[in-house]
Amino acid sequence: MLIDCDRCAVQGPACGDCVVTVMLGAPPAGVEIDQSERRALDLLADSGLVPRLRLQPLPDRATG
């Protein structure tokens, strides 16, 4: 999974409560995480230790 903050539909209002911003400061090149890392982040969020991933990808321009 590629997390590209520049392609997130809720960028700005949701950034302060997103795990990427909290843990990494929204790196300009984005972040790539694999399935096991995603599960680990979900477990941390379920435990209340970090906020959830708030990524809402923008639709592809080619597909609408």
Image (spheres, rainbow, N blue to C red):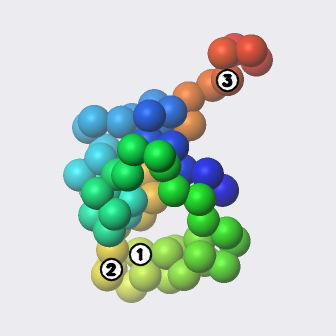
Q: Secondary structure at mark 1?
A: helix
- Closest to the observer, 49 or 1: 1
Q: Is residue 55 visible?
A: no
Q: Residue furthest front?
A: 29
Image position, residue 7 (x, y; %): 50, 33
Number of other residues with Cα within 10 Å of mark 3, as a class: few under 14, some 14 to 19, many 20 or more:
few
Q: Amino acid at mark 2?
A: Gly
Q: Residue 9 appears in which quarter of the rendering?
A: top left
Q: Nearer the viewer, mark 1 or mark 3?
A: 3
Q: Amino acid at mark 3?
A: Asp
Looking at the rendered image, the quarter that the C terminus falls into is top right
Residue at image position (47%, 46%) is 29
- Closest to the observer, 28 or 8: 28
Q: Amino acid at mark 1?
A: Ala
Image position, residue 10 (x, y; %): 39, 35
Q: Residue 14 appears in which quarter of the rendering?
A: top left
Looking at the rendered image, the quarter that the N terminus falls into is bottom right
* Cα–Cα gap, marks 2 and 1: 5 Å
Q: Which mark is residue 60?
A: 3
Residue at image position (60%, 65%) is 33
Query: Are circles 2 and 1 on residues that touch, CB within 8 Å?
Result: yes
Image position, residue 3 (x, y; %): 54, 50
As drawn, is 51 to the left or to the right of 41? Answer: left
* Cα–Cα gap, marks 3 and 2: 32 Å
- Closest to the observer, 62 or 44: 62
Image position, residue 45 (x, y; %): 41, 75
Number of other residues with Cα within 10 Å of mark 1, as a class: few under 14, some 14 to 19, many 20 or more:
some
Q: Mark 3 or mark 2: which comes first in sequence?
A: 2
Give the residue number, with chain letter if any, for mark 1: 45
* Cα–Cα gap, marks 1 and 3: 28 Å
When the figure is inspected, residue 63 is found, relative to residue 20, above or below; the finding is above
